[in-house]
Image (cartoon, rainbow, N blue to C red):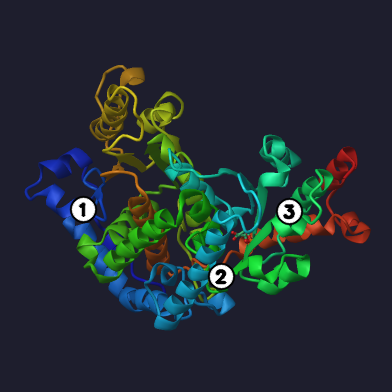
Amino acid sequence: MGADWSAIEALPKTPLVGLFGEKGDRLKLLAHDSCGMRFDFAKTHLTADAIAAFEGLARAQGFAAKREALFGGGIVNPSEGRAAEHTAQRGEGAAESVALAKMLHDRMRALIDAIEGDALGPVRHIVHIGIGGSALGPDLIVDALSSDRLRYDVAIVSNVDGISLENALADFDPAATLIVVASKTFTTTETMLNAGSALDWLAEHGIDDPYSRVIALTAAPDKAVEWGVDETRVLPFPESVGGRYSLWSSIGFPAALALGWDCFAELLEGAGEMDRHFRLTAPSQNVPMLAAFVDLLYTQTRGVTTRAVFAYDERLRLLPSYLQQLEMESNGKSVTADGAPLGRPSAAITWGGVGTDAQHAVFQLLHQGTHVVPVEFVASIEAGDAMDPEHHRLLLVNAFAQGAALMTGRASEDGNRNYPGDRPSTTILLDRLDARTLGALIAFYEARTFANAVLLGINPFDQFGVELGKEMARGIDDPAARAGFDVSTRMLIERAGV
Ligand code: F6P
């Protein structure tokens, strides 16, 4: 039998402004400091009654036991019979998994030391080849933390479109380039083609043994060795670390190399701090759980289908793409963990951009469109630039003003100029964007995704939805299978000559 949502569905729909008018300290209830960040949920429709109703749902769904199973290495991915041990990578998990993570991190660090000591010859450029979880995490961290500390040029290549690799290699000296092949399975078509072409590029530019310039990051070390990478340059990570949760493992190698080990270690420490918060804090103060309550309040009781994340910080411009995979690949499901129909909406569609640019492009719809889109503002008190401080002041002022305007609106007789208001937003305000806080922020999103999944009864750790398209793309190479395609697809294949 499905979980009982009646108490949540029966919650009154008091307008936001009215909630602020009610007795009680709304900020005390809904604004919490954790891991160097303020999480302000006050401009959402969450109330003490709503939190109590979600706490009831969490109990009914066995939340505490499922969270312990996550941290304890239990099978939380039943369709694949696996644990999900990304938290062990930052020291929070079953003792043997934490020990294994430490051993693999030590190995990664030793290889970084060797590279810094010129053991692989000159290295000035890193081409990291991977896709999905094997690219989005490293890309986000390197981009967010790169200001004034990047010790190598880093290009992240994910798309199979040759333009991507061509652009990445254009300014690099082959004699000083390291090729990093990141793939959990070491079979992903796009990655293997890009990796092969990168090796060809090295060979064409006179590198005698291109494989000597390759590092592999994978949960399938045998496959990497079979492909030609020397075992000493294969950095494994456990099968129990999911692709979109893998940036903490050897998949984070380009960040650890380019930003320095201390920076990577701080990232892990920050994530560990958020893990402890998620594991030990009561639901009413637990920021990933409160964020999940907000998500579900809108998707499950108000017909909301999307949520938008705006980074009011250029350094976090890749955050929305990272979150798209994390949230949509994890919770975009139509069945519960035991395969029964879900019977209610699953994850909201995640999208977003950067402020203030987005204000001049998509905020019209947010203020006056017919869709209600819960918005999340992410900003940092400390500026990341050395320009006139007025830049950063204006950036923050805009973020805060948008949240207030979405909530209060402004009534006008003239429909064109009427702002309905009552549009929710959450603000995550970082003290500063450093490695530690970024680690905690990403771990917050992971925990929120897990909390959403448990409350809905979804398995967030498989992704069978991506398989059919891959299989059909492979089928196009087989003439018999090709003949089985519909006429529209056959004509497109024929016209493109592929
Ligand atoms: O196609 C989806 C996916 O399996 C993601 O879950 C994963 O992050 C990505 O492909 C890359 O997979 P791999 O790391 O095995 O190359």
Q: Which mark is residue 195?
A: 3
Residue at image mark 2: 237
Q: Quadrant of the N terminus?
A: bottom left
User: What is the three-letter code of the residue carrying label 1?
Assistant: Asp
In the image, taking residue 425 as reference, residue 351 lies left or right, namely right
User: What is the three-letter code of the residue carrying label 3?
Assistant: Ala
Q: Do the residues labelled 3 and 1 touch (CB within 8 Å)?
A: no
Relative to 488, say whether 3 is above or below: below
Residue at image point 81% right, 53% down = 208
Residue 24 visible in the current orientation: yes
Q: How crowded is mark 3: few (under 14 residues within 10 Å), some or many (20 or more)?
A: many
Q: Residues within 10 Å of mark 2 (few under 14, many from 20)?
A: many
Residue at image mark 1: 33
Residue at image point 34% right, 54% down = 436
Residue 154: x percent and y percent? 58, 44
Residue 340: x percent and y percent? 53, 73
User: What is the three-letter code of the residue carrying label 2?
Assistant: Phe
Q: How far apart are marks 3 and 2 (CA)?
A: 19 Å
Residue 263: x percent and y percent? 40, 53
Relative to 67, say whether 190 is above or below: above
